[in-house]
Amino acid sequence: MHFAQSHHFGPVQSLQMGVGYFAPPPVKVHAFLVDGLLIDTGPPKLEKELLAWLEDKPFQQAFITHHHEDHSGNVNGLHRRFQRPIYGSAACSRLAQGQVRTSIPQLIYWGRPRYTNKVQPYTQNLLHTEHHQFQLIPIPGHADDQVALFEPQQGWLFSADAFVHPYIKYYMRYESMQQQINSLQKLIALDFEQLFCCHTPLMKGGKKQLQQKLAYLQNYYAQVVHWHHKGCSPREIMAQMQQKERWGQYLLSGGYMAAINMVNAVLRDEQLTRKANA
Ligand SMILES: [Zn+2]
């Protein structure tokens, strides 16, 4: 069953979208609309709902925070229906044209990714709407092309998928923990009040939660390095850290979404750091 619920966070509106099978959707995602600017477009399965929601709204332009299908999923439909400019980082524009990586659980809950050449590369640091000016801040780690939007006058931070939850239990195969740590530090340094996370918007206490996530990842990273230096394999490192694999998800996704990917991310990051310092 398709789930689409509209919300108001002051002048920021959102459509929260998800798909459930005989149960509420296990994962949902917001597309935000503020001052004519649509931030992300939701998953392909919810195209009809997103377009219907926008029908009576002053939609002027869109910005895609990153190419994952629950954010860029309806760019083609949006372009067809409204013919407004749709922007993203240069990397997002490029990645959205290629094959967006996916897995069975993602196909079930978001739908098949749609390649699109309709994301225009936006290379300036500021994006203007009629009443606001948004700073565009690259925050790679979860995805290479990920960008946050910060409106300093209002204290709004649109953080894409940099937050989601303070205690992350699994990674997709290509995430970087070191880059996520750097990106979180960048976001925490900003003076914001409201955290418009696409999966978990927080009107209060967002900065504290980002700090919790940063501390969690820093500690996790240090522990993996510690056990790696003791000669443990990735699975042995998980056992030492009492981290359990999510086998159902692991098997369904062919290892694409798994707890072990967090350990591997750290080992990959460490190797890169060593190479850079050599
Ligand atoms: Zn994502």
Image (cartoon, rainbow, N blue to C red):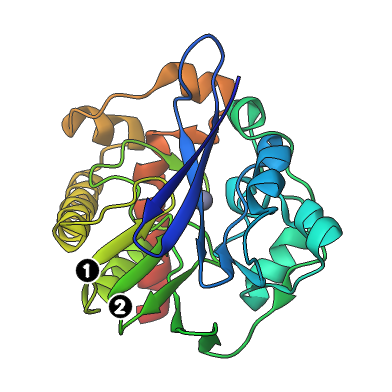
* Element carrying mark 1: loop
Say if residue 177 shows up in the picture. Answer: no
Q: Tell me what residue is drawn at x 70 percent, y 62 percent.
A: 95
In this rendered view, identify the residue nearer to me: 97 or 170: 97
Per the image, the residue denoted by label 1 is 193
Looking at the picture, does residue 85 appear above or below residue 212? below
Q: Pointer 1 and pointer 2: residues touching (CB < 8 Å)?
A: yes
Is 9 situated left or right of 138 in this image?
left
Say left or right for 144 vs 108: left
Question: What residue occupies the far right of the structure in this picture?
Answer: 80
Q: Is mark 2 within 8 Å of ligand 1?
A: no
Q: Residue 127, percent across and down? A: 54, 84
Foreground tag (1 vs 2):
2
Q: Position of residue 208 (x, y in %)?
A: 13, 59
Q: Position of residue 134 (x, y in %)?
A: 45, 82
Q: Which mark is residue 57?
A: none
Q: Quadrant of the N terminus?
A: top right
**Mark 2 — residue?**
154
